[in-house]
Image (cartoon, rainbow, N blue to C red):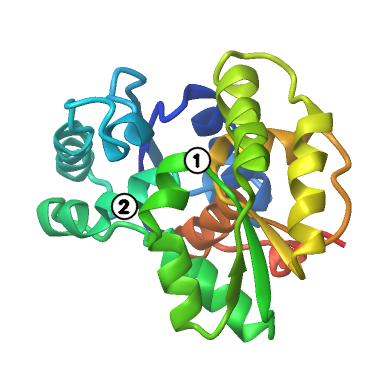
Amino acid sequence: MKTLGVIGGLGPMASAYFLRMVTEMTDAATDQEHFEVLLHSCPQIPDRTRFLLGKSEEDPCPPMIRIGKKLAENGAELIAIPCVTANFFYRRLNEEIPVPVIDIITETAEYLAVRGVKCVGIMATDGTVRCGFFQKQLEQAGIRVALPTENAQQDVMSVIYDDVKANRPVNMERFERAAGELRRAGSEVILLGCTELSMAHRDNHIGAGYLDVMQLMAKVSVESCGKLKREFEELITM
């Protein structure tokens, strides 16, 4: 087994739920059959979306690198970051942190391509959507991308920031309004492309045709560090 390091706090609820996912997905009959996890939760890391949109000059990458190095020094052999927007900094992180960092954007594109998905909708932060790194990777894999209109994107951001990050229940009316628009645009699968959106999946029956990107990150973590339960091979909701 390998030791997993987690750069957490982006946000705190997503990190806590990620650890629960990892534990539930691990095929273990005793405590000792679970792999070791080192979590450094640092909610003070500057907001990734604000930086990417030019609304803040506080670069979130240096503290993530510092934490990643500290985790590696303490025995982490693989790093997971339960924040999709943080993947914008993947190259810098992977170059500076001395152990591998999970590239969840590439993992997602490969997971969908292998399953023959041709069109996906993205529900994510403004930073992820406007920077285009998710769209680029999916399109390189031959997958067409549908994005929310401006009003629907405002609904998505409200769910992320006004609900989950504010420790409030998810407003499912907003969630479903944005998702419905992506379905009408031809999306076979809708990506929950922000770890906060995993709370909508956790607390509500969201229906078929969704892929929770943080759940995929947990799957990759377990496959790399331990043993995955077979029921978590397929993650697109039915």
Q: Amino acid at mark 2?
A: Phe
Residue 150: x and y in percent read 59, 42
Residue sitting nearer the eye, 46 or 238: 46
Residue 51: x and y in percent read 27, 33
Question: Which residue appears at 19% of the width and 45% of the height?
Answer: 72
* Secondary structure of residue under mark 2: helix
Residue 149: x and y in percent read 63, 48
Q: Earlier in the sequence, mark 1 or mark 2?
A: 2
Quarter of the N terminus within the rendering:
bottom left
> Could you say which disc has been placed on residue 153 in the image?
none
Determine whether, in the image, residue 135 is placed left or right of residue 122.
Answer: left
Q: Amino acid at mark 1?
A: Thr
Query: Is residue 168 visible in this depiction of the protein?
Result: yes
Determine whether, in the image, residue 183 is placed left or right of residue 214.
Answer: right
Query: Is residue 4 visible in this depiction of the protein?
Result: no
Q: Residues within 10 Å of mark 1 (few under 14, many from 20)?
A: many
Q: Is residue 175 above or below residue 224?
A: above
Q: Residues within 10 Å of mark 2 (few under 14, many from 20)?
A: many
Question: Which residue appears at 74% of the width and 25% of the height?
Answer: 170
Residue 35: x and y in percent read 47, 49
Q: Is residue 154 above or below residue 12?
A: below
The residue identified by callout 2 is: 88
* Image quadrant where residue 155 sits: top right
* Image quadrant where residue 195 sits: top right
Cα separation between marks 1 and 2: 12 Å
> Could you say which disc has been placed on residue 125 in the image?
1
Quarter of the C terminus within the rendering:
bottom right
Residue sitting nearer the eye, 101 or 1: 101
Q: Nearer the viewer, mark 1 or mark 2?
A: 1
